[in-house]
Amino acid sequence: MKKIYLAISEEESLGIKPVLYKKIPNSEILFISDQEIEEVLSSSFHMLIVPSHKIDLSEINTSDLAGTLVILDPSHTESFSVSRNVDTYNSIDNFKVAILTKDLENQDLKIENNTLSLKQNFDHGEEKAQHKEPSTQKNEVRTFEGSKLTKETRKAMNNVNETEEGNLSKPVNLEVLPSAPFSKEDPILSLEPEHELKTNRAKLIRENNFNFGKWKGNKIIGVWSPLATNGVSTFVMNYAMFLSDFDIDIMVLEPLKKDPVLKSKLTRYQSVPDNWVSFFEALHNEELDINLVKWFFRGVYWLPLQKNDYLGEKWTNRDINEYMKNLKKCDIGFVDLPSKEIESFTVEVLKHLDELWIIIDNRYDQTLEEIEEFNRIRQYSSTFNFATKLIVTRCPDEEWAKDLAKELDFPLIGVLPSMDAEIQMSERGHKPLLDYFRSRKKLTPIFEVITTHLLGSYFDKYKPTPWKRMKRILSKG
């Protein structure tokens, strides 16, 4: 009897169990706990399927494994082999497809006579135990530190410039929605000549448009909401303009979205700069002037997307990485994340964050219904090492917000009252909220509380004096 062990939930296994029984005859499928993984690895198992965050390959001698280790790693968009008997797939569904499909991208994995053959010998039984071939890849070639490749390994693999490390993972598959990536950095792949040219052009765009930054404590803040119409973009824009009164440089970046909105919101207050092009237009079209990317308004540098950026050139993780590096050129960078479910291309952005601010409103029951998404955020926060904070809007009172924050188990850093009437007035009047006295009066004390959290001991140093505030206002575009 061939024993197949699953370190995944019964719910996750529903689609794969019938396939395994069909393709691997005479097999027994058993569920195991996290504590039993190590014991199974040292046994004569036939196959073990385990999520990447539950295993550390640096502690395993893969050449001694009796069976096949299948690792589910959603931070990758394509399957690949770690060693001759360890394979990685980005989801259980993709592994299922690999078993069912004859013509596979991974040529080591084939279906032969209705039996799965992995690397010419999928049945790792007594025969394999008696004749173990040496591993084709030593552990140091793929050194894991909580599943991160070391700098030495990455440098040896492709001589990546360590002063500006890149996430050089394969193209993002927009149809794949990852559930829980496990590493701060994807494994570094080969640096193709085409990408090297794009990397150099991306650097030129940054150096020509965003070469500034006064504060040594650069921070990148993502702002996200589990529900639509929670005013994420409105908050980001107005808070960034408020923060520009401080003696620091601010940037707002719009990441990959199916429906970008930042440009249209900006054009309510200002005409599009002459001949302006988005970062991605300039990156992919060498005929465009790289100096046309800059959009400066109200003391803030803006990086909106064009409508066709989403459907135009194929985005890769590397493109997203180069895009996010722009935020390293300022003091505080904000990322206006798409609301609702976190998609695969958004996960690439999360890897760059220092903090994630979650905006929720008074829709208590609907908010709590998104508990699964909040749990995913907690996992991303732990995996990518960013802090997660809560801002409550349309709030009836502060105690209500504190109770909700306690329920969700996120620290509360800001409570905003309902601003619906003011927002409508702003949109009709074609002026930012902060340009209206009543709105500024409401927002300023709350924004100052949030800024105290953001800047810490630097708050008083960079807080604008009346003269500084006037000077900044006069100098704004």
Image (cartoon, rainbow, N blue to C red):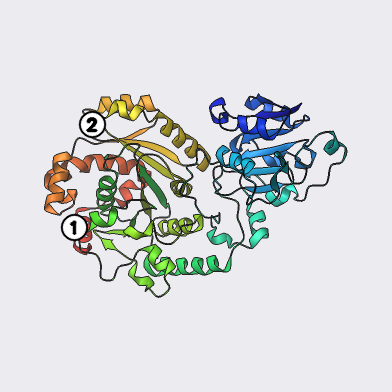
Task: Tell which residue pokes out farthest to the front in this image.
Answer: 113
Residue at the spot 33% in from the left edge and 30% down from the top edge: 367
Residue 302's x, y, as percent? 31, 58
Disc 2 designates what residue? 395
Q: Which quadrant would residue 165 be assigned to in this image?
A: bottom right
Q: Which quadrant would residue 123 be assigned to in this image?
A: top right
Residue 390's x, y, as percent? 35, 35
Say which amino acid is labelled 2: Cys
Say which amino acid is labelled 1: Tyr
Residue 113's x, y, as percent? 72, 41
- Residue 178 badge: none
Residue at the spot 32% in from the left edge and 58% down from the top edge: 307
**What crowding class fits label 2: few (fewer than 14 Cα within 10 Å), some (14-19), or many (20 or more)?**
some
Residue at the spot 52% in from the left edge and 55% down from the top edge: 171
For the image shown, how many numbered marks are present on the structure?
2
Tell which circle, 2 or 1, labels the residue nearer the N-terminal end.
1
Task: Tell which residue pokes out farthest to the right in this image.
Answer: 130
Q: Is residue 173 left or right of residue 458?
A: right
Q: Secondary structure at mark 2?
A: loop
Residue 27's x, y, as percent? 72, 28
Disc 1 designates what residue? 269
Residue at the spot 76% in from the left edge and 26% down from the top edge: 1
Q: Is residue 306 left or right of residue 133?
A: left
* Near-viewer residue (462 or 8): 8
Q: Secondary structure at mark 1?
A: loop
